[in-house]
Image (tube, grey):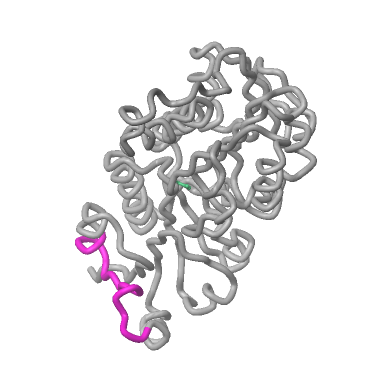
């Protein structure tokens, strides 16, 4: 039987590429000398796409008249226009669950790094300041007694909440609606959540609905002891407003794993002392990334073998 033709948009993990090569005829867009010419030639044959962080919209979909499925690497899929996919009758899958614990662990690590300035303290040691100047200055913030406001209490948000509870933090949340069976106090607006907490954990997905939801008003409600952690999507925070709030002391600090224009990190944030910045490493351990890659493969295989995906995005269900 002829193997289905699929397109790969960027290099993927070896364990993924090996399995895709075995099961499919793989066309590698990133390896093409002339990507447009390649798409014109193979576009009509392509029935599946193994996607890593590339934009999918009407114009892109138009190049693949026989496309059936986009199997996207990552839990977030704000780069995929799901309405356009629904119109084109293209299934979209992502890689949830397998990364939940990893991202929750990273979120807690980032929160503690930010509150206690651990990255800055390590730089102090590595720069020889411990011997030359003495101990790192006492951190003016502490984790003890904080209230964690979670924006986006989905699978990852809940895993973060569970971990934070064991650190003795009080928890509250805001999301589209109050969740049945969840005992944490619910706030009907982000401003109300920010007023009630001093540590705002952003886990919300990107997209039009959440674009710049964390704005100047929310940051001002968080207050001078306030710390913002973002493990969700960069677009959820208005970065210019965040830099203003940090520079003016409207809030205390921030820990960010995601940014509006990755991989670019705003100069203003880079210069601020009480900010911890990570290069989008939330799920980035070898084991977790392998598991996510395996789901990309398994979704494609399942689709072409049974006509059903394993982990469709909610819009498709
Ligand atoms: C993401 C991921 O969506 O790491 O950011 O999966």
From what the image shows, is residue 138 above or below residue 174? above
All told, the count of numbered labels is 0
Whether residue 279 appears in this view of the structure is yes
Q: Nearer the viewer, residue 270 or 150?
A: 270
Q: Which of 47 and 244 is in front in this view?
A: 244
| Quarter occupied by residue 154 | top right
For this orientation, the residue located farthest to the front is: 132
Q: Residue at x 73, y 36 (%)?
A: 250
Residue 183: x, y in percent?
66, 15
Residue 42: x, y in percent?
36, 81
From what the image shows, is residue 187 above or below residue 21? above
In magenta, the rendered stretch is 20-34
Residue 151: x, y in percent?
65, 34
Residue 99: x, y in percent?
40, 37
Give the left or right position of residue 86, taking residue 139 as reference. right
- Quick check: is 26 in the magenta stretch? yes
């Amino acid at each position: 039987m002829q193997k289905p033709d699929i397109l790969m948009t960027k290099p993927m993990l070896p364990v993924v590429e090996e399995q895709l090569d075995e099961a499919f005829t793989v066309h590698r867009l990133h390896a093409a000398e002339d990507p447009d010419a390649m798409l014109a030639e193979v576009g009509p044959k392509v029935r599946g796409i193994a996607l890593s962080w590339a934009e999918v919209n009407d114009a892109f979909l138009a190049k693949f008249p026989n496309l059936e499925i986009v199997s996207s690497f990552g839990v977030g899929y704000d780069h995929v226009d799901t309405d356009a996919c629904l119109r084109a009758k293209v299934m979209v899958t992502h890689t949830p669950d397998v990364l939940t614990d990893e991202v929750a662990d990273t979120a807690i690590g980032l929160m503690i790094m930010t509150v206690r300035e651990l990255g800055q303290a390590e730089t102090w040691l590595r720069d020889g300041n411990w011997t030359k100047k003495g101990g790192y200055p006492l951190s003016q913030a502490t984790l003890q007694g904080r209230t964690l406001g979670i924006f986006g209490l989905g699978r990852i948000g809940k895993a973060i909440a569970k971990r934070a509870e064991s650190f003795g933090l009080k928890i509250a949340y805001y999301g589209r609606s109050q969740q049945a069976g969840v005992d944490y106090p619910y706030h009907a607006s982000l401003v109300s959540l920010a007023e009630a907490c001093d540590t705002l954990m952003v886990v919300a997905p990107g997209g039009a609905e959440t674009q710049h939801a964390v704005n100047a008003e929310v940051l001002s409600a968080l207050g001078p002891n306030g710390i913002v952690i973002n493990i969700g999507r960069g677009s959820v925070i208005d970065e210019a407003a965040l830099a203003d709030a940090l520079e003016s002391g409207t809030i205390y600090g921030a820990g960010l794993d995601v940014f509006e224009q990755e991989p670019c990190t705003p100069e203003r944030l880079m210069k601020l002392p009480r900010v911890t910045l990570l290069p989008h490493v939330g799920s980035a351990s070898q084991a977790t990334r392998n598991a996510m890659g395996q789901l990309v493969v398994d979704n494609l295989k399942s689709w072409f073998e049974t006509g059903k995906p394993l982990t469709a995005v909610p819009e498709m269900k």
